[in-house]
Image: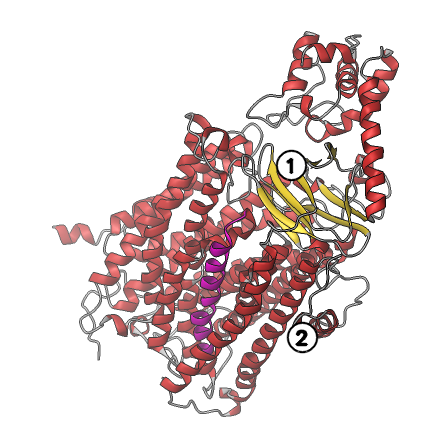
Amino acid sequence: MSIVKPRRVWQSRAMVAGLAGVPLMLSSGLALAAYGLNLQPPVTPTAWDILGLHNLIMIVCLVIFVVVFSFMFYSVFAHRKSRGAKPAKFHESTTVEILWTAIPFLILVTMAIPSTRVLLKMDDTETDAELVVKITGYQWKWQYEYLDHDLSYFSNLSTPRDQIENKAEKGEHYLLEVDNPLVLPVGKKVRFLLTANDVIHAWWVPQLGVKKDAIPGFINEMWTRIDEPGTYRGQCAELCGKDHGFMPIVVEAVSDDEFNKWVNVRKTEMVAAAAAADKQWTKAELIARGEKVYQQCVACHGAAGLGVPGVFPALKGGAIATGPVAGHIDIVVKGKPGTAMQAFGAQMNDADLAAVITYERNAFGNNTGDVVQPSDVKARR
Amino acid sequence: MASAHHDEHPTGLSRWLFTTNHKDIGTLYLLFALLMFFVGGAMALVIRAELFQPGLQIVDPHFFNQMTTMHALIMIFGVVMPAFVGFANWQLPMMIGAPDMALPRMNNWSFWILPFAFTLLLSSLFAPGGGPAAGWTLYAPLSVREGMAVDFTILSIHMMGISSVLGAINIIATVLNMRAPGMNLMKMPLFVWTWLITAFLLIAVMPVLAGAVTMLLTDRHFGTHFFDAAGGGDPVMYQHIFWFFGHPEVYILILPAFGLVSQIIPTFARKPLFGYDSMVYATASIAFLSFIVWAHHMFTVGMPTAGELFFMYATMLIAVPTGVKVFNWVATMWRGSMSFETPMLFAVAFVFLFTIGGLSGLMLAIVPADFQYHDTYFVVAHFHYVLVTGAILAIMGGAYYWLPKWTGHMYNETLGKWHFWLTVIGMNVTFFPQHFLGLAGMPRRIPDYALQFTEFNQWSTIGAFLLGFSQILLVIVVVQTIRGGKKAANKVWEGAEGLEWTLSSPPPYHSFATAPKIK
C-alpha cells in the first residue's frame, strides 16, 4: 500500500479542516447544515491538496480584503464633508506606491509556490498506474472501458422523467444517479484516459478533485487514488448541448476483493446478453424491452416521439420509423454523421437494438406491426 | 454658404438617422444600451425563474441554453460595450477640448450598424431550431453541429466587430489629434486614458474574434476542418483563438469603468486622484498582460504542465496593477472631504464589490484550485461580480455623474439613492450565493440541479427579480431628468475638475468651437 507522505503544516488534514472553518464563520450565520459553503469533503490526496490550497488562498484574500476596506470604510465614515472634514492636499508618494506594488507581489509568490507543488503532483499521470479506465463522453452519457479487463459499458442518468417533469416526488439523489456507476478499487492509482464521441464534455467528480475535458479526437489523461470506500457523485462540466445538465457521474469506490468480484459478474452478464441475441423474441417481449431501452432516446426524440421541431426529428409518423425496416435499422446502428444521432451499434447489443426499433415502429401510433429480431440487426451490422 | 448649411439641424427621425454630432450619437449609444439591458435582463430572469427550484418548470433545456447564450451576447456586445462608447462619444471631445469626434460620419455608421446586428441576432430565436444554444463562447464542435441560428450569430458578430473597430479608430484619432493645445498625454483625464488603451485593445482583438467565427462558418458550410480532429483540425484551437480575443475583451469591458470611477471619486472626495501616473501605468500594464493570460479560461483542456504554470503566473501578476488601482482609489478617498451623492455611492460600491470579483479571479488563477472551480457557479459569480457590480455599477455611476451636464437638469436625488440601494442589494443577493453553489459542486449552464443546491438558487432568483425590476427606477430617473428638473449649474459638482465643467449645461452643439487654454 502507498504511504502517506508527511505534508507541510498548511497541507495537513487537521489544519485544512480547521482552516475551512474560518471562511465559514465569516460568511454570515446561515444554517451550516442546510447550506454547503465550501468544497465537498475530499476523499483523495489530490482533493485534500486542493482544499488546502483553496482555504489558504481564501484566507489570504479575506485578510487583504478586510484590511483594505477597513481603511476605505473608516475613511467613508470619518472623512465626510458633513462631519467638517477638510480635504488634505497630498497626492503621489513614491514610497507608498512601491510598497503597495511590492507587498502584493510577495504575497503572490507565497501563493504560487504551494500551487506549483500541487500542480506538479496532479500532472504526474505517467507513473505507477495500477488500473487504466478509458472514459468517453457522448451526448448525453458516459462510456467506461476497463482496458485491462476487456470490459466496457455505458452509464446513463437513471432519474425517472416523471421526477424531472415534476410529476413525481424527487428522490434523494435527483439528477446525480446512474444505471451503471463507475466502479473503482480504493487505494490504487487509477489512470483515466478521456475522450469524446461528438462534442466536448468534461468529467468531474468534486470529492476526487479531478476535472478534465473529454475532447473528440484527442486523449486527455488524469489520475486519482481514492482513500475511502463510498459513492461519489459528479456531473459533466462542459456545455455539451441540450441535456448537458442530465449526464451525471457516479463512482463507487470498493475494496479490491469486491472490485474483482464485480468485474467477474459484469463479464458473465455480457455473455448472457450476447446469448439472448440468438433466440427468437415475441413481439410483446420486444416492445416491453424496447420501451425501457427507448429511455436513452427520450432526450432527443421525446417520450411521445415528437422530437424537437427543427432540432431533433419526430419519430411519430416519421419517414424512417414508418418506412422500410432496413433503413430504420441502418440509421440506429450506424447513426447520422454530423448530427446528434449516434451509431448505437457500438453502444447496444443486438437484442436491445431490435427491441428499441420494434418499439419505435409500433409506439406513438406508428402501428406498422413490424417485428425486428436481433438476428435482423446482426445481419445489417 | 457652407456654414449656413452647417447650422441646419434636421429634426425628428432624420436628426437621429443622419446625425454626425458626437452628443446625438452618444445619446443613441446609451439609449440602445439601456434598451438592450432590458432585453438581456429579461432573458436572465427567464434563466433565474427556471432555476428557482429543481425540476423543469418553465422552459425546456434547449431553450434554456438559448437564453444563457443570448443573455451573454446581448449584455456584453449590446449593453456594456455600447454604453462605454456612448460615454466616450459624449465625453471625450468635451474632456479634451475638441468640437466633436475626429471622424463624424464614421461615427454615425458605427452606431447604426448595431441595431441591425442585434435585430439579426434576436431574429435567430425564430429560426428553425431556435436561437444559438452553444454558449456565447460558441465552442466547436458543438457550435458546428447546431442549426442556422449559429450562422445568424456569426454574421451579427461580424457586424458588431466592424462597429467596435470603427468606434475604436475614431476614438484613437480623436484623442491623438484633437486635444486642446497644452493638453499633453499625461494631462488627459483618466477616463480618456482608459478609453485610449481600450480602443487599442479593440482594434487588436475584434479581428481575432472575426477570424475565429469565420473559421466556424467555413467548418459549418464549406468543408474545412479547422476544429474537427477527423479532418486534421483541433477543437481546442478554437478555444485558444477565442480566448486570445476573450481575455482582452474582458478588459475592454472593465478599463473604461476604471476610468469612470477615477473621475467620480476625486470629485466627491474633493481631492485629486492619489497617483495619476501610476493609474495610467497600471492601466497600460493590465492591457499588456491581457494578451498573455488567455489560456487561464481553459486550464481543463489538458495543457502541458509548463503551459499551465506560465498562464497561472502571468494571470496572478494581473493582481499587482489591479491592486494598485484599488489602493489608489482608497488613498484618494483618505482624508478627503467626502459627500455621497448618487454617483459617489455607485463608485464606492464599485470599488468594494469589484474587488470581490478581482479576488475570486485571483483564486481562479491557481490552476489546481481552478480544476474545482472551472465551469461551476463559482465562475458565474466571479464574472458577474466584475461585470455587474463592476462594469454596470460604474456605468450607472457615470450616468448619474454626467446626466445633469448632458440634460441641463438635476436628477431626482431621492429616486437615485433608492435606485442605488435596491440595485446593490439585488446584485449581492443574486450573485453572492452563487459562490457557494459553485464550491458545493453546481456546474454552470444547467437548467435543472440536484436538491442540495435549492436554497441558494432560490436566494439568487429572488435577488435577480429585485435587481431586474429596480431598473425601472433608472428609466424613470432618466426620463424625468431629460424632461425637466432643477437647472444644473455649469460646474454641476462642487469638487469637479476638468474641461467639460467649463461648458454650459447642456453643452453647446459643437462642444469647443475654439480650443480652450490648458494651464
Task: For label 1, count other residues whose C-alpha is less than 10 Å away and answer few (under 14), some (14-19) or many (20+).
Answer: many
Instruction: Please say whether residue B315 is one of the residues in the magenta stretch.
Output: yes
What chain does badge 1 belong to? A
Query: Which residue type does callout 1 highlight?
Result: Thr
Looking at the rendered image, the quarter that the C terminus of chain A falls into is top right
Secondary structure at badge 1 equals strand
Q: Position of residue B25 (x, y in %)?
A: 34, 53
Do marks 2 and 1 share a chain? Answer: yes
Q: What crowding class fits label 2: few (fewer than 14 Cα within 10 Å), some (14-19), or many (20 or more)?
A: few
Task: Identify the amino acid type marked 2.
Answer: Val
Q: Main secondary structure of the magenta part?
A: helix
Quote the CA–CA distance across marks 2 and 1: 38 Å
Seen in the image, is B198 located left or right of residue A179? Answer: left
Which residue has dot 1 on it?
A136
Picture coordinates of residue A284 (x, y %)? 88, 14
Q: Which quarter of the picture shows residue B117?
A: top left
**Residue under label 2:** A9
Q: Regarding mark 2 in the picture, which secondary structure is present there? A: helix
In front here: B235 or B279? Answer: B235
- Residue sitting at 48 percent across and 91 percent down? A85
Span highlighted in magenta in the image: B302-329
Q: State the residue at coordinates (45%, 67%).
A: B317
Q: Residue at x 51, y 50 (%)?
A: B303
